[in-house]
Image: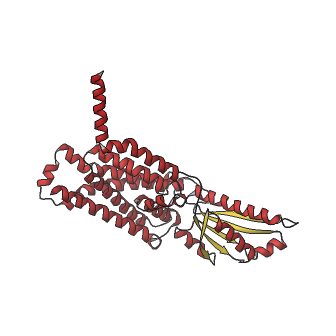
Amino acid sequence: MKRFIGFVTKEFYHIFRDRRSLFILFGMPIVQILLFGFAITNEINNVDIAILDHSNDATTNEIINKISASKYFSVKQLIEREDDIEAVFKKGKVKAVLNFEKDFSKNLIKDRQATVQIITDATDPNTANTISNYVNSILKKYQQEQNKAITINYVIVSEPRMVYNPELKSVYMFVPGVMTIILMLVSAMMTSISITREKELGTMEILLVSPIKPFQVIFGKVFPYIFLSVINAIVIVLLSIFIFKMPVQGSLILLAFESILFIVSALALGILISTISATQQTAMMISLMGLMLPVILLSGFIFPISSMPIPLQFISHAIPAKWFIIILKGIMLKGVGLEFIWKETLILIGMTVLFMGISVKKYKIRLE
């Protein structure tokens, strides 16, 4: 029994000395529960909306103030023409436009009825439905408050209108997200074990004494996976178009360019993971746990980023998948060109250069 107790004590010492084991045992559960607790929500908060007020009277101003005073919406833009609505949605910032009819207040007094149109970006059908329901709730509450003071009740009629996905097909949301997850995880995992495999097989010494420069080794390991990942992307797009009837409203050339850019970014991230990992097991764990959860939870694929706490919103900016999903939805569903997604494209280019630069630097350190 003393031998057994001694053996168990030794195992405890080994576990407590290994920081990676302690992080897996205690750190990962804490991180996961915080991510799931704060990120997974069907509620919306601080959603950016625009207002098109043809009437601009006291009643519409009071309703707009009610909506903007709630924690659910933030009025970011006032537009003057209906022709501007499409341009506002293509920029990707605004998720809904409230269109108040002309002579709104007069119609309430004269006809006891007035109409407000709720136009939502249905590229994310769940969020679009939630926005419409929340606006309806605020309008009904305002209507009930006003009807208490008058003898003849009036009615505010809301007319929902979903753009880019009028049938609210969930596949329009899932295809860009699933494509992003597959390309990110497959590309990153494939490259994350490339250099660590060389270390474990003992072939790293051959690379160390070879005349090949560090950047050549890095690009040499990335290039074959670019070709394989591009085939993956083509298969996903073809299945989306012909099986799931996913539309591609924008340029296929632009879609191909952005997909290759994201693939290179994911591969560069995988190479970076492989250069800082000692074993294939560590590299796989980092690529799975360090990429899968953030990509699914913090990329805006399923849960709206605007509803998350501010710290998680800042973290989401560092996730390449977030920017690629915005690009995919813009090209495939909205038909936008590079003039609307240039910022997201530059961010992906910057991330790719950063990942590749750190990888080369880390590899140089190992050569020395």
Asked if 106 appears above or below 153 in the picture, the reply is below
Q: Quadrant of residue 271?
A: bottom left
**In this rendering, position of residue 185 left or right of residue 334:** left
Q: Residue furthest right?
A: 151
**Residue beneath the point at 19% across and 58% down:** 365
Rendering coords of residue 241 (x, y %): 49, 56
Rendering coords of residue 170 (x, y %): 56, 53
Q: Quadrant of residue 129?
A: bottom right
**Residue beneath the point at 40% across and 56% down:** 234
Q: Is residue 230 visible?
A: yes
Q: Which quadrant of the figure contains the N terminus?
A: top left
How is colour applied across the structure in the image? secondary structure
**Residue beneath the point at 31% across and 45% down:** 19
Q: Residue furthest top?
A: 1
Rendering coords of residue 212 (x, y %): 15, 59
Q: Is residue 245 visible?
A: no
**Residue beneath the point at 31% across and 58% down:** 268
The one of 225 and 360 positioned closer to us in this rendering: 360
Rendering coords of residue 351 (x, y %): 35, 64
